[in-house]
Amino acid sequence: MSAPELYILGSSSATPTRDRNPSSQVLKIGSDKIMIDCGEGTQMRLIQLGIRHTGLDYICISHLHGDHYYGLIGLITSMNLMGRKQNLNIIGPPHLKDILDLQLKEGGKQPEFNITFHATNPEKPELILKTSHFELSSFPLKHQIHCTGFIIKEAAKERSLNIDQIENHQVPIAAFKSIKAGENYINDKGEEISYLLLSHDPKPSKSYVYCSDTIFDMDIIPYIKDCTILYHEATYMEALADKALERYHSTAKQAGIIATHAQVHQLLIGHFSSRYDNLEPLLLEAKSIFPNTALALEGLKFLINENDADAEPTVLELSNAFNNH
Ligand SMILES: [Zn+2]
């Protein structure tokens, strides 16, 4: 399976700006797509980035501040109008279900697909879903209201064969599958040969952590440690650390401190206050603490990978689908 891909759809906090929409991202992992937060304008970004609804079977909402979910009912409505039939998993605070139920009931049209709702827990980390491609967990964040981060980790990979040893011991093809699964091989003479000799350890699974709105909080370190890419909000610069504290947000410097302690491979910062037109100073501030940092800007695609050759994001064209009309 190729490395998971992360698409940034929205990076603004609270209100949109000329270039930035409220929070939303899509992680593509195998054939699955997982949306994380769905602020207003997310549907337009999906169109602009050419990301189809197909395969978008999981939507995670971190908390119920409007800039993180006001796009959700519109997206569900469009999915229905486009004839969606497959189940949609929505993961979020318990009252999100009540809000959606009311919106759909009063709108007089129930979707023709099933919605499976998974409530997040603001008190402790929880495994929410496990599929053949990934594991999805939530963990508590400290914000003004019930808020969780999300961890998406690739499913464990299988071992790879040590071809030299396979040839040395004349292991038949029929035994390959069980060796890769961690079983010893017994040859015709009844000799047992360890799978550890006949195969290599699997490549470590990549993981992506999304730290939505949160105060600077070292308590999250155990949950997010060693992840491949960490997204952490950086609403303000350190000069406004008092404001960040008062509003339960973080600064770019604090995001860098969290990434350093968590020993992540790469840090992405986002959820920028609309007061900043130029985001370079926020990037430099985070980089002064944690050098491998990038801005999570709309239209960027990041590979969830530890290969430094892949560290630079791909810049996608944000073509406005309605420009020609
Ligand atoms: Zn918030």
Image (tube, helix red, strand yellow):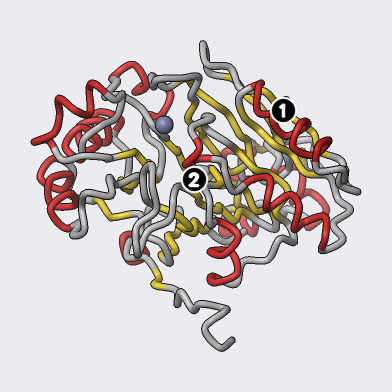
Report the residue marked by disc 2: 206
Picture quadrant of residue 246: top left
- Spot occupied by residue 114 in the image (x, y as percentages of width and height): 87, 41
Q: Point out the residue furthest to the bottom here.
A: 324
- Say above or below: 64 vs 168: above
- Spot occupied by residue 261 in the image (x, y as percentages of width and height): 24, 28
**Does residue 178 appear to the left or right of 180 in the view shown?**
right
**Does residue 161 appear to the left or right of 105 in the view shown?**
left
Q: Is residue 166 visible?
A: yes
Mark earlier in primary sequence (1, 2): 1
Q: Nearer the viewer, residue 12 or 195?
A: 12
Name the residue rendered at 27%, 40% in the picture: 234
- Say above or below: 67 vs 225: below
Report the residue marked by disc 1: 97
Compute the Cα span from label 1 to label 2.
Answer: 31 Å
Q: Which quarter of the figure is the N terminus placed in?
A: bottom right
Ligand 1 resides in the quarter of the picture at: top left
Name the residue rendered at 52%, 43% in the picture: 205
- Spot occupied by residue 52 in the image (x, y as percentages of width and height): 68, 66
